[in-house]
Amino acid sequence: MKKQIIAAFVSFSVFCLSTAALAAAPIKIGALFSVTGPASFLGEPERNSAKMVVDEINKAGGVKGHQLELITYDTTGDATKAVQLANKLIKDDHVVAIIGPSTSGETMAVIPVVEKAHVPLISCAAALKITEPVKSWVFKTAQNDTLAVDRIYEQLRKEKKTKVAILTVSDAFGSSGREQLKAEAGRYGIQILSDDTYGPKDTDMTAQLTKIRASQAQAVICWGTNPGPAVVARNAKQLGLTIPLYMSHGVSSKKFIDLAGDAAEGIRLPSGKVLVADLLPKSDHQKASLISFKRDYQHHYNADGDHFGGHAWDAVMLLKGAIERGADNPTSIRNQLEATRHFAGIGGVFNYSAKDHAGLTKDAFVLVEVKNKNWTLVK
């Protein structure tokens, strides 16, 4: 009888330990960021922000008793490599969701992988076609380029400028921006007098800008990610181009000002609110999250938290919210992401639905301008 009691006690103890171990199993989240390579200005702050917020969540006890395990790979901005690493995250690492990639081209390449595997992806890239039409397993945190286009065109209409020149980079991000600039022009009474492109590795855009200078354009809109737009800014200054120069949200970080130098002065662009968080009214729903994010990033990395790092912060926090609401596998996480409402993040206030996996409105953007080598809010 005594042996039976001991055996039962041992069995019960093993069961409890096994149950505790099972309950405490970490939840694996994958991340694909362009930490090195041409898009490192995107991927490095994204990687840093994701790691920062996951560490903070884990130090606070995790989510519903689970620690989050972040498995991050550097895609170097290469779409083929991104696909290979997405498969590795799904088949070898058994992640429940993937954050990233950093760029639109990589994201479009990875979408068929996650759709086939039924693993939710929260992209940090901006192209409209990432989530339009809606894909069941694909979400995004970067603001749609259509919203950025609308913000620029609204300002031009306010200033009664109706003739523009557009200069876009010949990659997925630039192509999407060019498409939206042309598609939205009519709604705002905008006439595009010059429509030109440049290559992602081009180091001189003087020819395109000389053509624009000879036109009757009242403003130039450049659509790309660093370093190309900084080259455009410097070339425009060298040519003495005096009409307003607008950039896309693809350069929404201090890195652009560093690259463009004095030529950045006066340039305007649509941006998430993080660049001007301190200038926002207290009533702004995002302000608390923005200030906290900037303070934490400065503490961890001795650098400014930016628009791009915010995409990854939002992605982690959206997953945290899904897990808090009971999700613990790819399907339930997908379902809870789609049910997310009124999440005030860094990129905006997110409201996902079955018909909208981007979740933001034009209110996610403010118009900013470079003054004295810093960002100011255009009112």
Image (tube, helix red, strand yellow):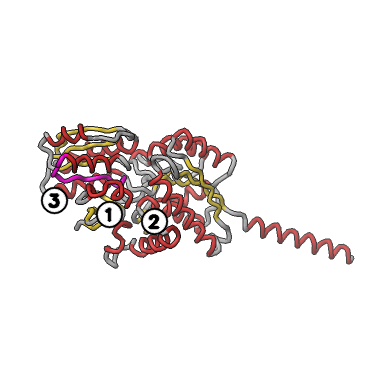
Q: Nearer the viewer, mark 1 or mark 2?
A: 1
Look at the numbered disc 1 and give the secondary structure of its residue: helix
Which residues are the magenta region?
Answer: 239-251
Label 1 crowd bin: few (<14), some (14–19), many (20+), radius 10 Å: few
| Residue type, numbered disc 3 | Lys
Q: Position of residue 287 (x, y in %)?
A: 33, 63
Query: What residue is rendered at 33% in x and 38% in y?
Result: 173
Q: Nearer the viewer, mark 1 or mark 3?
A: 3
| Residue type, numbered disc 2 | Arg
| Residue 363, label in figure | 1
Q: Position of residue 71 (x, y in %)?
A: 54, 48
Q: Position of residue 210 (x, y in %)?
A: 16, 34
Residue 47 vertical placement versus 282 (above, below): above
| Residue 158, label in figure | 3
In the rendered view, does 53 fall on the left or right side of 275? right
Residue that badge 2 annotates: 341
Look at the numbered disc 2 and give the secondary structure of its residue: loop
The quarter of the rendered structure image containing the C terminus is: bottom left
Report the front residue among 207 and 103.
207
| Residue 316, label in figure | none
The quarter of the rendered structure image containing the N terminus is: bottom right
Please indicate, yes or no, whether residue 151 appears anywhere in the rendered image. Answer: no
